[in-house]
Amino acid sequence: MRTLIIAAALAGIVLCITATTHADEYPERWIMAFGLRLAEPEDAESFIEFIREAKDLGYTHVFFDDFYNQTLRAMPQKYFDHIVMVRDAAREIGITIVPGIFNVGYSWRVIWYDSNLAAGIPARNVPFVVEDGVATVDQTAVPPLRNGSFEVSPDGGLGGWRIAEGLEQVISIDTEVARTGNSSLSMTNFESLPRDDRDRPINANVVQTVEVEPFQYYRLTIWRKTSGVDARGSSVLIAPTDGRRRRLSYTHFEVDPVQDWRDYVSPDSDWREFELTFNTLESTSIDITVGVSGATAGTVWWDDLKIEPAGLANLLRGDTKPFVVTSADGNTVYEEGRDFMYVADTKLGMEPLPEWLSYLPPGGTYSVWHPGPDIRLTERSAIQDGDTILVSYFHPHIVY
């Protein structure tokens, strides 16, 4: 905390020197209390010390953006006691506290109140099959992925996967290491990677182009094993092939704990499953890219890449996010409450929060994927067992 105050003081000295010349131009001088909190008594004491020093340096306002400013209904009484302590001290010192009350960018503090407030991506005409009065997503409705298990193809190649020229010494099928089957995809010998114009190793990737239906929502899983790896990260990238410079997924599988506390795996790890979800949007074909970036040492193995329908996981409901169920030909629109019961994902936005947000009950934090709800028919439903129905709905874009 002293480091923060000293840094603020140095910044304040510079501004105060300027202010002596232009006092009339700058009647208000603001500083941000970055990193300060009010959850504990010592937090309030540090805050008061900060505003005393800010006042001495000529500041008139302190901007304060505590994580908990926008989740006050969840806070214990002591939090409000600390607010009173700081408020009274600020009045005595003669400085104005300006709380941040609406977060822009990291919006979880807004959607913590209602996870359905997240922006939605449309999934359209997703096929569900009906059995015993319950409609579940059609598990056969998946893109035609080839050789997701990375077995040796009859021609000795990668069986549907392609690699860039110059990566033949880095990427291969390993018949001695496998999670299942007889082989896996190996990436090693990173010292032989070609370098880019900044003298950095290029990414080591394999790519497969897959035909897809537009606006379908999928879950992708893959297993990774590492040995002695020194790399910036690894990922499965999903991108359309229509020339648009955009991604359909932004989930990275880091090997650096600084980058992503959720997906950290040590440079030496046994097989571990990773997952992501993606929506095909307008695409009729996509490129699936598997690989590592910034690699300089060690070996990475990949195995058992699979794609399955994501179903109603993270289903969003609301006036601007309609939930529509039709017959397979689209001619009949079924009514919620008459033909099927109300559908909601009770796990939506209920991923556990990190420890530093321990005061808050779950809310506003989304899992990449979890089993979503089924669609249950009513006794008077016009939908029959054996029918295929089409479901259109909205889900969030999950980034981890």
Image: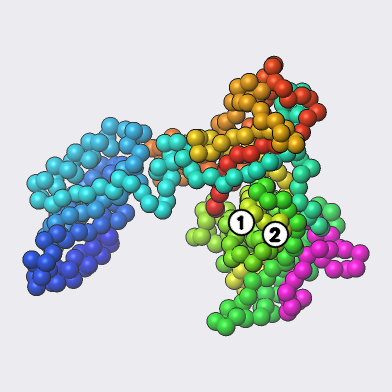
Task: Report crowding for label 1: few under 14, some 14 to 19, many 20 or more residues within 10 A (C-alpha).
Answer: some
Can residue 382 be seen here? The reply is yes
Picture disc at residue 248: 1
Left or right: 343, with 26 as reference point: right
Left or right: 63, with 343 as reference point: left
Is residue 167 found inside the magenta-colored segment of the image?
A: yes
Residue topped by disc 2: 286
| Residue at the right extreme, as displayed | 154
Contact check, label 2 and label 1, Cβ < 8 Å: yes
The alpha-carbon separation of the residues under discs 2 and 1 comes to 9 Å
Query: What's the magenta bit mostly, secondary-structure-wise?
Result: loop
Q: Is residue 218 above or below residue 21?
A: above
Residue beneath the point at 28% across and 44% down: 38
Residue beneath the point at 66% across and 23% down: 339
Residue beneath the point at 78% across and 55% down: 145
Which tag, 2 or 1, sits closer to the chain's start?
1
Instruction: Pick whichever, 97 or 277, lies toward us.
Output: 277
Task: Report crowding for label 2: few under 14, some 14 to 19, many 20 or more residues within 10 A (C-alpha).
Answer: many
Q: Which residues are magenta?
A: 148-171
Q: How many marks?
A: 2
